[in-house]
Image: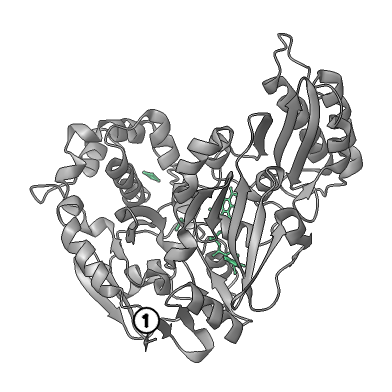
Amino acid sequence: MSQRSDIRFLLNGRAISLPSVAATDTLLDFLRIDQRLTGSKEGCAEGDCGACTVLVGRLTKQGLRYEAVNACIRFVASLDGCHVVTIEHIRGADGGLHPVQQAMVDHHGSQCGFCTPGIVMSLYALWMEVAQPTARQVEVALQGNLCRCTGYEPIIKAALAVSEYGTATADYLAETRDGITEQLQELRDGARVVTGPVDNQAIVPADLDDFAAVLVENPQATIVAGATDVGLWVTKFLRPISPAIHINQIDALKRIEVADGAITLGAGVSYSDFLPLVQEHFPFLLDYWNRIAGWQVRNMGTVGGNIANGSPIGDTPPVLIALGARVTLRKGMERREVPLEAYFIDYGKQDLHAGEFLESVTIPVPSTAQLNAAYKISKRRDEDISAVAVGISVTVQAGQITDARIAYGGMAATPKRASAAEAALIGRPFGSATFEAAAQAVATDFQPLSDWRASADYRLLSASNLLRRFYMEHSDVDQPVRLVV
Ligand SMILES: Cc1cc2nc3c(=O)[nH]c(=O)nc-3n(C[C@H](O)[C@H](O)[C@H](O)COP(=O)(O)OP(=O)(O)OC[C@H]3O[C@@H](n4cnc5c(N)ncnc54)[C@H](O)[C@@H]3O)c2cc1C
Ligand code: FES
Ligand code: FES
């Protein structure tokens, strides 16, 4: 296998080759400081405000796909083989303002202007996917863009009107698509990239087997998938991550397979990549899924990273545990499978050996007898971390509960099943008394902490009320069960 040291990608209309890229170099610094492309702004440097939003195009099985991402937490080394598009590159058919920009001007979508380039890039990405979005689609696309001036209404009006100003098929990026695809294919030379100074090195493995081998050689390395956690270690905590192994370009980690009543997703599948599967196989999860971070973070962040980071407040583990998910862990060519709940051992401690990585997650498709739900309690509706999250899966046959799996996040040092609450349900009739008993049993399952997200009392009350809510939503009762307040 060949090896090179330069990172190669396309930036707007130019080919870029950087001979040495440090593991901690971010795209936003590269754009603003090295390239003097200062249209992309730095508001928070942690993926929250969207002022730095750019598009990154990559080759997928479906062809060239552009996504809105946060340049502030995207590492330059992860861009090998990609097309970066910044606000400076977008234009209308006649070389003037782009339809999104013109709509923003005409609808007074900008005041101080700091957020505007990021908002234009997010709306541009939306317009490429959906020509005439609904107000809800606009809101979801803008979850990761903060504006302190406008109150959003003029921006939403602009977003709804973009198609009056031009069509995405006649857009500059659409017209150059074939040429860009060809250039990106040429950049894919199958080489391993090792770049940056020895004390701040980035490695981009050639493929999945190469990744497994590189990790065995460097068991102390930092694996970087979407960088939506690791990016903040660098920008907020100034933590060294060398050597960093970038895995977001490995196609084999992005595979999604539906077979034998289960869905297997590679650890590199992003939230956005998985969204169509959520719509088809787990429709109950749609609202919950769209409340994980904002659109840019969902385009970058992976389900694998959310599990691997071992956080007790990650949003996917509770619902995946409730659905009976298993994870495949790999070291070199050796693989082992463990139930997801067994992966979390204690706070900061996972069942992951040195040199081992998470390769895939397998989720059984629910049977028709299963009732499922996932709920998230957070201070803000969008773009916020959970205080409490829960995944609930209850199997009901002939009015009796034959199985129950309930897993909470935010209630213990790890995502954890509520075994007493489950026991209160199994073998009992599907009725309000049964769920009341389960709601009360939650107090024997958990002794949560108080922190800035929620007090222990609030967490316990919310956790038990979510079981009452589950019953209300899945029963035919006309009189709603009263929530305890
Ligand atoms: C603004 C913002 C909002 C957020 N909101 C939410 C939210 O609402 N809910 C939520 O749950 N999270 C949220 N997050 C956190 C983050 O987006 C998720 O945890 C995400 O899933 C992490 O995935 P990633 O691919 O970006 O991981 P990375 O940052 O690349 O990695 C995370 C950790 O996992 C390890 N890792 C990654 N892949 C593997 C692998 N295959 N094998 C072994 N180890 C691996 C890394 O070494 C690192 O320790 C938010 C983050 C930001 C910046
Ligand atoms: S600067 Fe705020 S999201 Fe990047
Ligand atoms: S126009 Fe000022 S922050 Fe949005």
46 with respect to 106 (left or right)? right
Q: Quadrant of residue 59?
A: bottom left
Q: Residue at x 59, y 78 (%)?
A: 332
Indicate the position of residue 35 as horizontal and vertical percent values: 28, 72
Residue type marked 1: Ala
- Residue at 49 percent across and 84 percent down: it is 201
Q: Position of residue 439 (x, y in %)?
A: 84, 30
Relative to 439, say whether 472 is above or below. above
> What residue is disc 1 on?
191
Which residue is at a point 69% across and 58% down the rendered structure image? 311
Q: Is residue 339 left or right of residue 62?
A: right
Q: Secondary structure at mark 1?
A: loop
* Nearest to the observer: residue 34 or residue 468: 468
Q: Does the rendering let one see residue 218? A: no
Image-based side of 195 in relation to 267, left or right: left
**Label 1 crowd (10 A; few <14 / some 14-19 / many >=20):** some
The quarter of the rendered structure image containing the C terminus is top right
Is 7 left, or right, of 305 in this rendering?
left
| Quarter of the rendered structure image containing ligand 1 | bottom right
- Name the one closer to the observer, 157 or 459: 459
Q: Which colouring convention does the figure follow?
A: one colour
Q: In this view of the protein, which residue sits in the foreground, 397 or 89?
A: 397
- Asked whether the viewer can see residue 95, the reply is yes
Q: In the depicted view, which residue is nearer to us: 162 or 452?
A: 162
Question: Based on the displayed image, in which of its 4 quarters is residue 151 positioned?
Answer: top left
Residue reaching furthest to the left: 94
Q: Position of residue 202 (x, y in %)?
A: 47, 80
Give the residue drawn at x 89%, y 35%.
441
Residue at the far right in the pictured view: 444
**Direction top: furthest residue:** 478
Farthest-out residue, front: 260
